[in-house]
Image (cartoon, grey):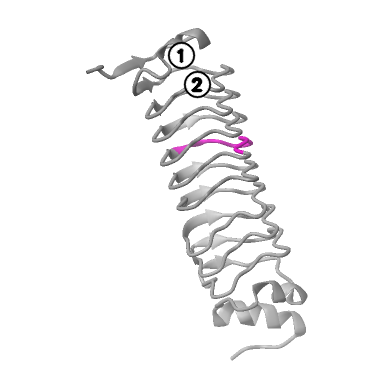
Amino acid sequence: MTSEITLSDHKPAGGEIERLSGKGPVTLLNCDLEGLNLADLDLTGWCFERCNLRSCSFNRAMLEGASFKACRAAESSFVGAAMLEAVIDGGDFSNTNFRGARLTDAKILRCKMTGADLSDVQAIGLVLEEVLLVLAVLPKLSFREMTLKHVDFSEADMRACDFRDAVFEECSLRDAHLAECRFENADLRGADLGGVKLTEARRFRGAIISRRQAADLLGQLGLRVL
């Protein structure tokens, strides 16, 4: 039985990570991996905690069950990575590229992802809680039947996303790009719809909104809801 390996306060070279690849879970604590190319490596079950992952490449890496806790990973790349049941908890993943990644049953919690690119990701079972996705790129992503908690989509590109039967709890869609989105049976009462014009309200056809939200929209016509 292979014992788990832990590296702490270390700055490993790419070759060192490659030698550990595929040999079971490894825990990296407060390690500096900035700029390393870890593409195509088997990092299944690895734990990265309080690590500097800025500008790292995890493209096409095997990251099933991996966890990223309070990591600094701005401008890193996970293009095509297999991240089934992975967990991102805390940290900064701003301007990170997840294009084409498999995020099935993954969890993203308490994380900054400003400007992140999640185009073409597989996101069945994805959990989002307390995530800052301002200016993120999320076209055609399905949020169907999801409960979104404290997620900020302000100014995000969300064209053709599927929000059917989704529930928003203290979220923001302020100034998001929502062309061709579907909102049938979505509960938007917990969403900030600031910036939405009455002429654009048809995008929310079939959704549930509050009296306050309805009053804000009708107020653009000079009408008051009592």
Rendered residue at 69%/62% (across/down): 178
Quadrant in which the N terminus appears: top left
Is residue 97 shown in magenta?
A: yes
- What residue span does the magenta drawing correspond to? 90-98
Rendered residue at 67%/52% (across/down): 139
User: 10 Å neighbourhood of mark 2: few (<14), some, or many (≥20)?
Assistant: many
Is residue 1 shown in magenta?
A: no
Give left or right: position of 75 versus 185. Answer: right
Question: Which residue is denoted by mark 2 in the rendering?
Answer: 41
Q: Above or below — where is 51 with respect to 191?
A: above
Rendered residue at 68%/58% (across/down): 176
- N-term-proximal mark, 2 vs 1: 1
User: 10 Å neighbourhood of mark 1: few (<14), some, or many (≥20)?
Assistant: some
Give left or right: position of 53 versus 136. Answer: left
Q: Quadrant of residue 203?
A: bottom right
Q: Secondary structure at mark 2?
A: loop
Position of residue 11 measured from the top left corner of the image (x, y, whole percent): 46, 11
Badge 2 amino acid: Leu
Q: Above or below — where is 89 with respect to 192?
A: above
Circle 2 or circle 1, nearest the eye? 2
Rendered residue at 62%/41% (across/down): 116
Q: Quadrant of residue 66?
A: top left
Estimate the spatial distance between the alpha carbons at disc 2 and disc 1, rounded to whole Å. 9 Å
Label 2 with label 1: CB-CB less than 8 Å: yes
Question: Which residue is denoted by mark 1 in the rendering?
Answer: 17
Inspect this view and state whether residue 128 appears. Answer: no
Position of residue 79 measured from the top left corner of the image (x, y, whole percent): 61, 33
Q: Main secondary structure of the magenta part?
A: loop
Badge 1 amino acid: Ile
Position of residue 162 measured from the top left corner of the image (x, y, whole percent): 60, 62
